[in-house]
Image: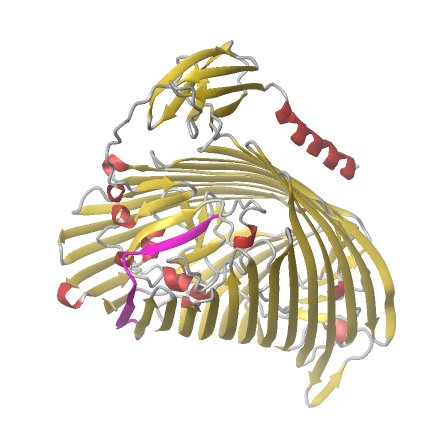
Amino acid sequence: MRDQLFFTVMFILISVHSFAQTVITGKLLTEDQKPIANVTVSYKKIGSPALLGFSKSDVEGIFKLTVKVIDVDSVQLDFNHLSYAKRSVHVVNATAHYAYILKAEVRKIQEVKLADVPVYNRKDTINYNVASFTGKQDRVIADIIKKLPGIEMRGGQILYQGEPIQQYRVNGLDMIGGRYGLINQNLPADAVLKVQILENHQPVKMLDKLVFSNRATLNLQLKKFTTTGTGKIGLGATPALWDANLTPMTFAKTFQILNSLQTNNIGDDVSQQLKPFYSGTGYFTARSSFSDGPTYLSIREVATPDFDQKKWLDNQIFLMSSNMIQKLKNGLEVKGNLSYFHDDRKLQGTTMTQYFTSDEVIQNQEMVDNSYGVDELNIGVLVEKNESNIYLRNSTNYRKHWNNSVGNILLNKNTTIYQDKRFSDEAFLNAFSLGRFIGKQLVNITSTVEWHSTPQRLSVSPGQFESLINAGKPYDHMGQIVLFKSFNFENGVSLSRKIKRWTISPSVNLNYNNSKLNSHIQVKEQNDVRVLDTGYFNDMNNAQLQLRMALEMRKEVRKFIYSFNLPFSQYYYNVRHQGEQRLKNEFRSSWNPSASVTYLLNSKNSIGTNLLSGRNFGGLDNFYSGYIINQYRSMQKYNARLLKDEDLSTGVNYQYKNTSKAIFANLAYNFRKSWRDYMFSTVLDSLGRSTTSITNRHGQRLSQGISGGLSKLFVSIKTVAKLNGNFSWSTSDYLLNEQLVKQHVNSQSFTFELINSSSSLVSGDYRVSMGRTHNRLADGLRNELLYNNHFFNLVFAPHDRHLISLSNSLYANNLKAQKSQYFMDATYRFRLSHWRTDLEFTASNILNNKNYLQQFSSDYELIQSYFELRARQFLISMKFKI
């Protein structure tokens, strides 16, 4: 049924544009009867200023227009060329052929200085002049990018028209890959001339005329090749505070380098600057980003507030990073990166949890006091050659992440529980891709090798789950030890060729995955240590072989862009657990077709739709039948089989941009329905402790969402306005204490932002964020959460060397136990112009708010968490430009 629906919808999408169209053709001649090329021919309704479509005449003077209006009898044709006089004619709205003569006339173009225009476009590149958006308070390029119409920043990630950018370049070079936060937060804004958005950018040059891209690339055009950067030294109280940053960078024509040393304890998590937001460079590159080793164990935590991290994060972090790129004369690019950070953190708070079952409501209070030590090391080397006749890319990366966590819990005010977790994930990844033309055929070969070792250990005192582990008797200590290892080997060959308007790309991939899981539970009672036997240990070895064959087809015709992908996979599974062959050469197959259509109405408007359907198998990591204690209050075992998931999803999106008026808009609707032949079953005891398993019952999930954004620059008053909204609905099934329950979630969110810099004396920005989440839980219980947050920043610059900024934020919700919280921060800055240095005095959390309450829910839980905030603090710092 789903396959029939898929093909029916696609047939409609392909066929609908063929109807209700008039085709007008013609020939344009000089007075000497010679053809005129490159004449812009457009049409519109008579008496209307709105342009409805256009084309250009070819070398023979021939033009062709497809007219799609059906509510008028006649239309107006306009002919424009710099060497000929303008001409307009009225024609019948019917298919016909005409011939027209244009008179020679040289037309003078009025000079426009692009440097004075805040936003303009050339072909597929949108240019933002940085000077037009820079205020006296702005120092780094991130301060500018977040203001630009059409662009958003969410947690450091940059989005254009609601979609993440695919590359971040400086002067055309992508030195740092997806970890562009290092540049964004440290490159001085006054070193940048323009921020450019390359729309529909195909980063692989060989694919430029073969594969259409609807993704955007961001490029920073510097004023000159330079050595620059930022530095900061700051000290403060209370307690004793420090904040230091030294990040020099050099941008030459073929060489770029960035080094960074940063450390602070003011709540600034600078490790986020190392977060990768993309990897690879597009269509046929091998997977070049690490998968994460599985985390089976955790200590109990308190939920962190969903607002500015600097107001609550208690940390001591040290970070170092070195990155470079060298482009050689033969076009080869060599990149290298080395980064390491260590972060000590403390989290304190109280969690009130209500567990809703069909029989009762269980309540727990947990006072949490946790400490964390987090380390991560990354080393990478990349060699890439991206030319029109060859594409070569090989990346080699090593990563090690280790985390030591200690937690103390006071449960229900009378029971103390100690937790100690040790976790590490060591990984190696090599990804290779080669593309060459053999005749007119583009051949691409990819290969990826990845290895993981992920040992972890959890200790809990006193021991829990007495009825399961120790015959109902109390005992001193329980320990869970887990060792996970995996190896992946992925290889593929693809061919691409253009046949008339179609690009055909068949591909074959052979992927192998092997993983091993060993675990056991230790119990200590006084001086007696024993390892639990059957039912409490795992010795699993599984292997998966996938043969994937796919046919991808793309077509560009007139203003339509079609894309179809028809992948078919065969899987072979082998699982051995505790000496028993659970699966032997088990065979499964899946088909996951997808399609999309994009219609470019004109240079300002586009609309697209997509449809995906498929079946996937998984669950190999859940084949263990022995219990694993994943948290002091939670145990799980999955005496599972191969798990099947089926999905059907579709979406429609619309984009609008008018660079001359600096207006950008996007709107999208998404629908997804999924079916699975299994359900997770959770059983709660009287203390709220849970055991989880997998049952052979079918479950469903349905979700829908509408999202959109609108932004505009008002040039006359130097103000940017941004509006974003999101609406979503979902229903899902889950099993709790053997009762089938359906959860319903509705949520709406809305943000509005104004950024004004019309005055050199006073500038500021205001943002409001409002939302509602409604949950319907077990036994008809309901929960509604409302929030209404306001942010107002005001900057006074009474003199070129003096600046005062006030940051105000108000957080409000509908929780009776939580009053609206108002935060105020202030900064005074004195400019030492000769030294290009700022002296700053900053006061944070001036009103000394001490804690914050928030509420959220899961399938069967309603959680309120009280979180301790950072106390009032003062910092004196010196910031300088290198």
The segment highlighted magenta reads 216-240
Q: Quadrant of residue 390?
A: bottom right
Residue 719 at what x, y percent from top left?
Answer: 28, 40
Q: Is residue 225 magenta?
A: yes
Q: Nearer the viewer, residue 500 or 145?
A: 500
Above or below, 433 against 671 in this view is below
Q: Is residue 559 magenta?
A: no
Q: Is residue 812 above or below residue 501?
A: below
Q: Residue at x 48, y 30 (%)?
A: 58
Colour option used: secondary structure
Q: Residue at x 30, y 63 (%)?
A: 225
Q: What secondary structure predominates along the stretch shown in magenta?
A: strand
Depth check, front residue: 725 or 688? 725
Quarter location, residue 659? top left
The N terminus sits in image quarter: top right
Decide if residue 702 is in sight here: no
Residue 664 in the image: x percent, y percent?
41, 37
Compared with 578, 70 (above or below) is: above
On screen, residue 342 versus residue 501, left or right, reads: left
